[in-house]
Amino acid sequence: MSTLRPDLAIIAGTIPAGARVLDVGCGDGALMAALRDAKGIDARGLEIESANVASAVARGLAVVQGDADTDLADYPDDGFDYAILSQTLQTTRRPDLVLDQLLRIGKQAFVSFPNFAQWKIRFAHMIGGRMPVTKQLPHRWYDTPNIHHVTIDDFKSFVAERGFTIEGEWYLSGEKARGAGLANLLAEHAVFLLRR
Amino acid sequence: MSEDGRFGLDRRTKLLGPVRLDSGGQFAPVEFAYETYGELNADKSNAILVCHALTGDQYLASTHPVTGKPGWWLRLVGEGKPVDPARHCIICINVLGSCMGSSGPASFDPGTDAPYGMEFPVITIADMVRAQAILLDHLGIERLACVVGGSMGGMQALTWASLFPDRVQSAIVIASTARHSAQNIAFHEVGRQAIMADPNWQGGAYYGSLDQPDAGLAVARMAAHITYLSEEGLTEKFGRRLQDRDAKTFGFDADFQVESYLRYQGLSFVERFDANSYLYITRAMDYYDLAEEHGGVLANAFAGTRTRFCLVSFDSDWLYPTIESKRIVKALNAAGAAASFVELSSPFGHDSFLLDAPEMNRIVDGFLKAGGL
């Protein structure tokens, strides 16, 4: 588990053994493999990139090639205890609808994303006058897969509007956890646990 | 196990059956032609059934007795391959209705002591699978660690998982579908009409006659063969190039390389295949719609299943395109089944699954190993 990306480590550490888990945008299945190896969890995954799916299946994981924007509708209500969307929300065409789907399929949902209001990004934009290119958002404006940037405060108000409940929240600066104080300004990443 | 005559290459056996048929009756006795590779382990937990496609046969990994060609899926099956006789007990059975030794229209009807011809019952994919189950009972194999198949073999794998969920631990379904589409049926009907329009077909009673429906069967194969390839593949291989000539002949010889190639495919096919078997097996495929007997809801075919599934499609396959695999995946998700699916890229159309596909091998290998195989 030590090699897991920090947001994934938080998610993996929180999910109890025996839970039914769907990892949306599971990449090559790093989190799923960690859940399997550490907790015996038989997780399911959805991933858009065929090379990632092949790698995940080759390591024995149940991963289906598909698109979060269109293919979540195929999953039944309440099929999972947890639906996970890590570092994927900002790449979807309709993040609002994807979140609705997530909390239809899963009783609870983990969502992690890069915080677009973190001070370095604000400075790059405000002072530099350019779209920010940082360690957590390394793409340029024309080739970025991140088409719906979101800040921690945006996300929280969206969650409130939708009537979802925040069950847990974690903030990261670099690899390290940090407190909730001034998170919107200081945190690079956020992880939320939501329920309907 | 090696002393056991039930296992090995080129096995034949006749079993009492009967096979219950979807058409209402039953079929008995049943002849089986099959091959096994590798040894069944002590707890019989390493059996892998490989199901062949429409014109395939049991010579999965050994030389074909008629054509002299190597086994048809040596890229996936063999020493050091994902399906490996060193680790697995691999079984491949000529399907019911075929012509390589299992009961089919060319077999002798014990009732009349003449070939069945069109008296052979119209069979379905499920009938083929129920027949295979009878042979596996005979082999003492209760549970299959995996059923693997491409194309019609994939239909059998899905049907196995649906009919015998407790006997199938995992299923690998490659370049396949859960139902035949109107277009699939249409192409098959062209092939059947080509056979039946051949005067040598003689209502199916051509066995023992000097006149065989070779021309009709060859045309059927030519039409079908086009559906196994892709436009890109054909263009790359042949383009508009002429065959052994510098100019068009202004006649109806095979001027183009692609014509010559198709004629060769048609002619070589009649050497090894029976026209009536072609009618019966294409019919079985056309009747195939796994959702039909489950109220039209495919997910119900897999309700409560504990079988693990792995599906692979190819982006240039227009016979059983990716959307058909995705339909199956959707149903498996709805049934809560453990399913994996990936669309691989290959320019070679439906036939991609029989060609060199390292990514497919990597996926199959990982999937089998995750199941402890």
Image (spheres, rainbow, N blue to C red):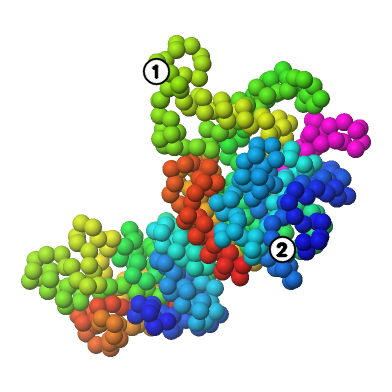
Discs 1 and 2 lie in a common subunit: yes
Figure check: B208 above or below B177: above
Q: CA distance from mark 1 to mark 2?
A: 56 Å
Q: Quadrant of residue B219?
A: top right
Q: Looking at the picture, which amino acid does disc 1 mark?
A: Asp
Write down the residue under mark 1.
B246
Q: Identify the residue at horizontal 65%, vertical 60% (top origin).
A: B85
B190 and B351: which is toward the camera: B351
A75 and B179: which is toward the camera: B179
> Which is the main secondary structure of the residues drawn in magenta?
loop
Is residue A26 part of the magenta span, yes or no?
no
Rate crowding at label 1 as few (under 14), some (14 to 19) or many (20 or more) other CA atoms within 10 Å. Answer: few
Is residue B112 part of the magenta span, yes or no?
yes
Which quadrant of the rendered structure holds the N terminus of chain A?
bottom left
* Coordinates of residue B125 in the picture (x, y in percent): 70, 46
Q: Identify the residue at horizontal 53%, vertical 35% (top origin).
A: B227
* Coordinates of residue A36 in the picture (x, y in percent): 51, 76
* Coordinates of residue B15 in the picture (x, y in percent): 86, 50
Which quadrant of the rendered structure holds the C terminus of chain A?
bottom left
Left or right side of A148 for B1 = right
* Boundaries of the magenta span: B104-124
Left or right side of A4 for A183 = left
Q: Looking at the picture, which amino acid does disc 2 mark?
A: Glu
Q: Chain of mark 1?
A: B
Q: Quadrant of residue A50?
A: bottom left
Write down the residue under mark 2.
B39
Q: Earlier in the sequence, mark 1 or mark 2?
A: 2
Figure check: B16 above or below B184: below
Q: Quadrant of residue A135?
A: bottom left
Q: Identify the residue at horizontal 25%, vertical 60% (top origin).
A: A144
B41 and B165: which is toward the camera: B41
